[in-house]
Image (cartoon, rainbow, N blue to C red):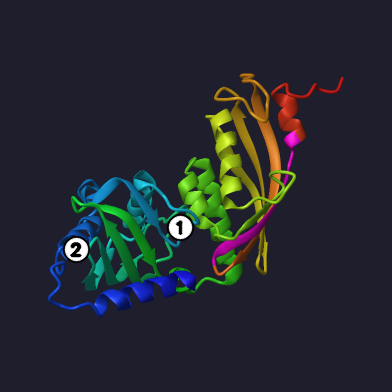
Amino acid sequence: MKTNFFFSVALFALATATTTSVYAGKYESSIRGFWAAVDKGDFDEATTFLHPDVAVIIPFSPVAINLEAYRQIGETFRMGFPDIQHQVLEVSEGKMTAAARCYFSGTNTAPLMGNPATGNRVEVPFLLYLTFDATGLITRFETSFDLANFNAQLMAGMDTESRNKEVALGIMQALDNRDLAEVAAAYDPGCRFNGWAPETLDVNGYIAMMSALLAAFPDSHFTVDDIIAEGDKVVVRHHLTGTHTGAEFMGAAISNKKVYVTATVTFEIKAGKPVELWLNADFLGLLMQIGAIPMPK
Protein backbone atom coordinates (compact mmCIF):
# COMPACT_ATOMS: atom_id res chain seq x y z
CA MET A 1 0.00 0.00 0.00
CA LYS A 2 2.82 2.43 0.86
CA THR A 3 4.57 1.65 -2.41
CA ASN A 4 1.44 2.31 -4.43
CA PHE A 5 0.90 5.59 -2.53
CA PHE A 6 4.46 6.67 -3.27
CA PHE A 7 4.06 6.04 -6.98
CA SER A 8 0.68 7.79 -7.06
CA VAL A 9 2.17 10.90 -5.43
CA ALA A 10 5.13 10.85 -7.80
CA LEU A 11 2.90 10.55 -10.85
CA PHE A 12 0.59 13.31 -9.63
CA ALA A 13 3.46 15.68 -8.92
CA LEU A 14 5.06 15.13 -12.30
CA ALA A 15 1.78 15.17 -14.20
CA THR A 16 0.84 18.57 -12.75
CA ALA A 17 4.16 20.12 -13.79
CA THR A 18 4.04 22.67 -16.61
CA THR A 19 3.78 21.08 -20.05
CA THR A 20 6.33 23.54 -21.42
CA SER A 21 9.06 22.18 -19.15
CA VAL A 22 12.48 21.92 -20.78
CA TYR A 23 12.51 18.29 -19.64
CA ALA A 24 9.36 17.27 -21.54
CA GLY A 25 10.11 14.31 -23.83
CA LYS A 26 13.72 13.93 -22.69
CA TYR A 27 13.28 10.42 -21.29
CA GLU A 28 10.08 9.13 -22.92
CA SER A 29 11.89 7.71 -25.96
CA SER A 30 14.18 5.71 -23.66
CA ILE A 31 11.22 4.30 -21.74
CA ARG A 32 9.42 3.27 -24.93
CA GLY A 33 12.63 1.89 -26.44
CA PHE A 34 13.34 -0.19 -23.35
CA TRP A 35 9.92 -1.88 -23.33
CA ALA A 36 9.97 -2.39 -27.11
CA ALA A 37 13.26 -4.29 -26.75
CA VAL A 38 11.88 -6.37 -23.87
CA ASP A 39 8.74 -7.27 -25.83
CA LYS A 40 10.74 -8.53 -28.81
CA GLY A 41 13.07 -10.49 -26.51
CA ASP A 42 16.18 -8.43 -27.29
CA PHE A 43 17.63 -8.09 -23.78
CA ASP A 44 21.02 -7.01 -25.08
CA GLU A 45 19.31 -3.91 -26.48
CA ALA A 46 17.09 -3.48 -23.40
CA THR A 47 20.06 -3.38 -21.03
CA THR A 48 21.66 -0.53 -23.03
CA PHE A 49 19.08 1.77 -21.42
CA LEU A 50 20.15 0.71 -17.89
CA HIS A 51 23.18 1.73 -15.89
CA PRO A 52 25.43 -1.27 -15.06
CA ASP A 53 24.83 -0.58 -11.34
CA VAL A 54 21.08 0.01 -11.68
CA ALA A 55 18.94 -0.78 -8.62
CA VAL A 56 15.68 -2.49 -9.60
CA ILE A 57 12.70 -2.59 -7.26
CA ILE A 58 9.87 -4.94 -8.31
CA PRO A 59 7.00 -6.60 -6.41
CA PHE A 60 8.43 -10.07 -7.13
CA SER A 61 11.53 -9.44 -4.99
CA PRO A 62 11.71 -8.38 -1.32
CA VAL A 63 14.99 -6.53 -1.97
CA ALA A 64 16.42 -4.39 -4.75
CA ILE A 65 18.05 -6.54 -7.44
CA ASN A 66 20.93 -5.85 -9.81
CA LEU A 67 21.05 -5.71 -13.58
CA GLU A 68 21.83 -9.39 -14.13
CA ALA A 69 19.08 -10.62 -11.79
CA TYR A 70 16.57 -8.29 -13.44
CA ARG A 71 17.60 -9.51 -16.88
CA GLN A 72 17.06 -13.12 -15.77
CA ILE A 73 13.57 -12.29 -14.49
CA GLY A 74 12.80 -10.42 -17.71
CA GLU A 75 13.90 -13.34 -19.86
CA THR A 76 11.85 -15.72 -17.70
CA PHE A 77 8.70 -13.63 -18.24
CA ARG A 78 9.39 -13.25 -21.96
CA MET A 79 9.51 -17.05 -22.25
CA GLY A 80 6.45 -17.58 -20.04
CA PHE A 81 4.44 -14.99 -21.98
CA PRO A 82 5.62 -15.29 -25.61
CA ASP A 83 3.07 -12.63 -26.70
CA ILE A 84 4.10 -10.22 -23.93
CA GLN A 85 3.35 -6.53 -24.45
CA HIS A 86 4.14 -3.45 -22.35
CA GLN A 87 2.16 -0.40 -23.38
CA VAL A 88 3.35 3.02 -22.26
CA LEU A 89 0.17 5.07 -21.78
CA GLU A 90 1.48 8.27 -20.26
CA VAL A 91 4.84 9.74 -19.25
CA SER A 92 5.61 12.70 -17.00
CA GLU A 93 9.15 13.96 -16.48
CA GLY A 94 11.26 15.83 -13.95
CA LYS A 95 14.84 17.04 -14.09
CA MET A 96 16.45 13.61 -13.59
CA THR A 97 13.32 11.46 -13.15
CA ALA A 98 10.35 10.15 -15.07
CA ALA A 99 7.09 8.51 -14.07
CA ALA A 100 4.94 6.46 -16.42
CA ARG A 101 1.54 4.82 -16.43
CA CYS A 102 1.83 1.52 -18.29
CA TYR A 103 -0.09 -1.66 -19.11
CA PHE A 104 1.14 -5.27 -19.18
CA SER A 105 -0.59 -8.04 -21.13
CA GLY A 106 0.35 -11.56 -22.15
CA THR A 107 -0.78 -15.19 -22.30
CA ASN A 108 1.00 -17.77 -20.15
CA THR A 109 1.60 -20.51 -22.73
CA ALA A 110 5.02 -21.66 -21.48
CA PRO A 111 6.46 -22.56 -18.04
CA LEU A 112 6.93 -19.57 -15.73
CA MET A 113 9.28 -19.48 -12.72
CA GLY A 114 9.22 -23.25 -12.43
CA ASN A 115 5.44 -23.52 -12.79
CA PRO A 116 3.72 -25.17 -15.78
CA ALA A 117 1.83 -22.93 -18.19
CA THR A 118 -1.75 -22.14 -17.15
CA GLY A 119 -2.90 -20.89 -20.56
CA ASN A 120 -4.43 -17.84 -18.89
CA ARG A 121 -4.21 -14.30 -20.23
CA VAL A 122 -3.03 -11.66 -17.75
CA GLU A 123 -3.65 -7.94 -18.09
CA VAL A 124 -2.56 -5.52 -15.36
CA PRO A 125 -1.77 -1.81 -15.21
CA PHE A 126 1.49 -0.81 -13.58
CA LEU A 127 3.30 2.34 -12.50
CA LEU A 128 6.92 3.04 -13.34
CA TYR A 129 9.24 5.51 -11.63
CA LEU A 130 12.77 6.00 -12.96
CA THR A 131 15.86 7.96 -11.98
CA PHE A 132 18.45 8.85 -14.64
CA ASP A 133 22.10 9.87 -14.56
CA ALA A 134 23.63 12.75 -16.54
CA THR A 135 24.17 10.50 -19.58
CA GLY A 136 20.52 9.41 -19.69
CA LEU A 137 21.01 5.89 -18.32
CA ILE A 138 18.49 4.56 -15.79
CA THR A 139 20.09 4.24 -12.34
CA ARG A 140 16.96 3.35 -10.35
CA PHE A 141 14.04 1.39 -11.79
CA GLU A 142 10.91 1.01 -9.67
CA THR A 143 7.65 -0.67 -10.65
CA SER A 144 4.42 -1.10 -8.73
CA PHE A 145 1.36 -3.18 -9.57
CA ASP A 146 -1.30 -5.30 -7.92
CA LEU A 147 0.58 -8.58 -7.46
CA ALA A 148 -2.47 -10.36 -6.01
CA ASN A 149 -4.48 -9.44 -9.10
CA PHE A 150 -1.66 -10.67 -11.36
CA ASN A 151 -1.52 -14.03 -9.55
CA ALA A 152 -5.32 -14.37 -9.53
CA GLN A 153 -5.48 -13.94 -13.31
CA LEU A 154 -2.50 -16.23 -13.87
CA MET A 155 -3.97 -19.06 -11.76
CA ALA A 156 -7.66 -18.58 -12.65
CA GLY A 157 -9.55 -21.83 -13.07
CA MET A 158 -7.33 -23.78 -10.71
CA ASP A 159 -8.55 -24.70 -7.23
CA THR A 160 -6.62 -23.29 -4.28
CA GLU A 161 -4.89 -26.52 -3.34
CA SER A 162 -3.74 -27.18 -6.91
CA ARG A 163 -2.45 -23.62 -7.19
CA ASN A 164 -0.57 -23.94 -3.91
CA LYS A 165 1.00 -27.21 -5.03
CA GLU A 166 2.23 -25.50 -8.19
CA VAL A 167 3.75 -22.68 -6.13
CA ALA A 168 5.63 -25.11 -3.87
CA LEU A 169 6.79 -27.27 -6.79
CA GLY A 170 7.95 -24.15 -8.64
CA ILE A 171 10.14 -23.16 -5.69
CA MET A 172 11.61 -26.65 -5.44
CA GLN A 173 12.39 -26.61 -9.16
CA ALA A 174 14.05 -23.20 -8.88
CA LEU A 175 16.18 -24.53 -6.00
CA ASP A 176 17.18 -27.50 -8.11
CA ASN A 177 18.11 -25.04 -10.88
CA ARG A 178 20.18 -23.09 -8.30
CA ASP A 179 18.27 -19.93 -9.24
CA LEU A 180 18.05 -18.10 -5.92
CA ALA A 181 16.79 -14.89 -7.55
CA GLU A 182 13.74 -16.79 -8.75
CA VAL A 183 13.39 -18.49 -5.36
CA ALA A 184 13.44 -15.16 -3.49
CA ALA A 185 10.90 -13.66 -5.89
CA ALA A 186 8.47 -16.51 -5.19
CA TYR A 187 8.09 -15.63 -1.48
CA ASP A 188 6.01 -12.95 0.18
CA PRO A 189 8.39 -10.16 1.28
CA GLY A 190 7.42 -10.74 4.91
CA CYS A 191 7.76 -14.53 4.77
CA ARG A 192 9.09 -16.27 7.92
CA PHE A 193 11.38 -19.32 7.75
CA ASN A 194 11.48 -21.75 10.69
CA GLY A 195 13.95 -24.62 11.05
CA TRP A 196 16.88 -23.33 8.98
CA ALA A 197 18.52 -21.76 12.04
CA PRO A 198 17.86 -21.57 15.80
CA GLU A 199 15.96 -18.34 15.18
CA THR A 200 13.26 -17.54 12.64
CA LEU A 201 14.74 -16.10 9.45
CA ASP A 202 13.42 -13.55 6.98
CA VAL A 203 13.81 -13.90 3.20
CA ASN A 204 17.32 -12.46 3.23
CA GLY A 205 18.44 -14.82 5.99
CA TYR A 206 16.93 -17.79 4.20
CA ILE A 207 18.66 -16.89 0.92
CA ALA A 208 21.96 -16.54 2.78
CA MET A 209 21.54 -20.03 4.25
CA MET A 210 20.66 -21.54 0.87
CA SER A 211 23.57 -19.72 -0.80
CA ALA A 212 25.96 -21.33 1.69
CA LEU A 213 24.44 -24.76 1.05
CA LEU A 214 24.65 -24.46 -2.74
CA ALA A 215 28.22 -23.14 -2.52
CA ALA A 216 29.30 -26.11 -0.37
CA PHE A 217 27.59 -28.66 -2.63
CA PRO A 218 28.04 -27.44 -6.23
CA ASP A 219 26.40 -30.56 -7.67
CA SER A 220 23.41 -30.41 -5.32
CA HIS A 221 20.15 -31.88 -6.51
CA PHE A 222 16.72 -31.57 -4.85
CA THR A 223 14.22 -34.35 -5.50
CA VAL A 224 10.55 -34.14 -4.49
CA ASP A 225 9.38 -37.48 -3.12
CA ASP A 226 5.84 -36.58 -2.08
CA ILE A 227 3.57 -33.54 -1.93
CA ILE A 228 0.28 -33.08 -0.06
CA ALA A 229 -1.93 -29.98 0.01
CA GLU A 230 -4.85 -29.10 2.27
CA GLY A 231 -6.31 -25.63 2.62
CA ASP A 232 -3.50 -23.06 2.64
CA LYS A 233 -0.81 -25.61 3.64
CA VAL A 234 1.44 -27.68 1.38
CA VAL A 235 3.78 -30.36 2.72
CA VAL A 236 6.72 -31.42 0.55
CA ARG A 237 8.81 -34.47 1.42
CA HIS A 238 12.09 -34.33 -0.47
CA HIS A 239 15.76 -35.22 -0.33
CA LEU A 240 19.05 -33.54 -1.22
CA THR A 241 22.03 -35.24 -2.84
CA GLY A 242 25.41 -33.68 -3.53
CA THR A 243 29.15 -33.75 -2.97
CA HIS A 244 30.91 -31.50 -0.46
CA THR A 245 33.54 -30.07 -2.83
CA GLY A 246 32.77 -26.33 -3.05
CA ALA A 247 33.27 -24.63 0.32
CA GLU A 248 33.23 -25.28 4.04
CA PHE A 249 29.76 -25.81 5.49
CA MET A 250 28.68 -24.87 9.00
CA GLY A 251 32.34 -24.74 10.04
CA ALA A 252 33.24 -28.06 8.43
CA ALA A 253 36.16 -28.04 5.97
CA ILE A 254 35.66 -29.41 2.46
CA SER A 255 35.38 -33.18 2.82
CA ASN A 256 34.73 -34.35 -0.76
CA LYS A 257 32.07 -36.64 0.76
CA LYS A 258 28.77 -37.44 -0.94
CA VAL A 259 25.60 -36.77 1.05
CA TYR A 260 21.98 -37.88 1.05
CA VAL A 261 19.76 -35.77 3.27
CA THR A 262 16.02 -36.20 3.81
CA ALA A 263 13.73 -33.28 4.67
CA THR A 264 10.12 -32.22 4.97
CA VAL A 265 8.99 -28.62 4.56
CA THR A 266 5.53 -27.20 5.18
CA PHE A 267 4.48 -24.09 3.24
CA GLU A 268 1.71 -21.75 4.33
CA ILE A 269 0.55 -19.94 1.19
CA LYS A 270 -1.66 -16.86 0.94
CA ALA A 271 -2.70 -15.27 -2.36
CA GLY A 272 -0.17 -17.36 -4.26
CA LYS A 273 2.83 -16.47 -2.06
CA PRO A 274 4.34 -18.47 0.84
CA VAL A 275 4.09 -16.42 4.04
CA GLU A 276 5.64 -18.96 6.47
CA LEU A 277 7.60 -22.21 6.21
CA TRP A 278 8.59 -24.94 8.67
CA LEU A 279 11.53 -27.22 7.87
CA ASN A 280 12.35 -30.59 9.42
CA ALA A 281 15.64 -31.76 7.91
CA ASP A 282 18.28 -34.29 8.90
CA PHE A 283 21.02 -31.72 9.59
CA LEU A 284 22.65 -34.11 12.09
CA GLY A 285 22.94 -36.78 9.40
CA LEU A 286 24.38 -34.21 6.98
CA LEU A 287 27.09 -33.14 9.44
CA MET A 288 27.94 -36.77 10.15
CA GLN A 289 28.25 -37.55 6.45
CA ILE A 290 30.74 -34.69 5.86
CA GLY A 291 32.73 -35.60 8.98
CA ALA A 292 31.85 -32.57 11.09
CA ILE A 293 30.43 -34.87 13.79
CA PRO A 294 31.80 -38.38 14.45
CA MET A 295 29.61 -41.23 13.26
CA PRO A 296 28.29 -43.39 16.09
CA LYS A 297 30.07 -46.72 16.35
**Mark 2 or 1, nearer chain start:** 2
Q: Is residue 241 above or below residue 116?
A: above
Residue 274 magenta-drawn? Answer: yes
Tell me where residue 17 appears, x and y as whole percent.
Answer: 22, 77
Dot 1 alpha-carbon crowd within 10 angstroms: few under 14, some 14 to 19, many 20 or more? some
Tell me where residue 58 appears, x and y as whole percent.
Answer: 41, 60
Which quadrant holds the C terminus? top right
The residue positioned 51% from the left and 51% from the top of the image is 184
Task: Report helix, strand or loop for mark 1.
Answer: loop
Q: Amino acid at mark 1?
A: Pro
Q: Residue 90 sits in which quadrant? A: bottom left
The secondary structure that most of the magenta stretch takes on is: strand
Q: Nearer the viewer, residue 62 or 255?
A: 62
Q: Nearer the viewer, mark 2 or mark 1?
A: 2
Kindly identify which residue carries mark 2. 32
Tell me where residue 280 appears, x and y as whole percent.
Answer: 74, 46
Tell me where residue 8 appears, x and y as whole percent.
Answer: 37, 76
| Residues rendered magenta in the picture | 272-283
Gap between marks 2 and 1 measured at Cα: 30 Å
Question: Can residue 88 be seen by looking at this rendering?
Answer: yes
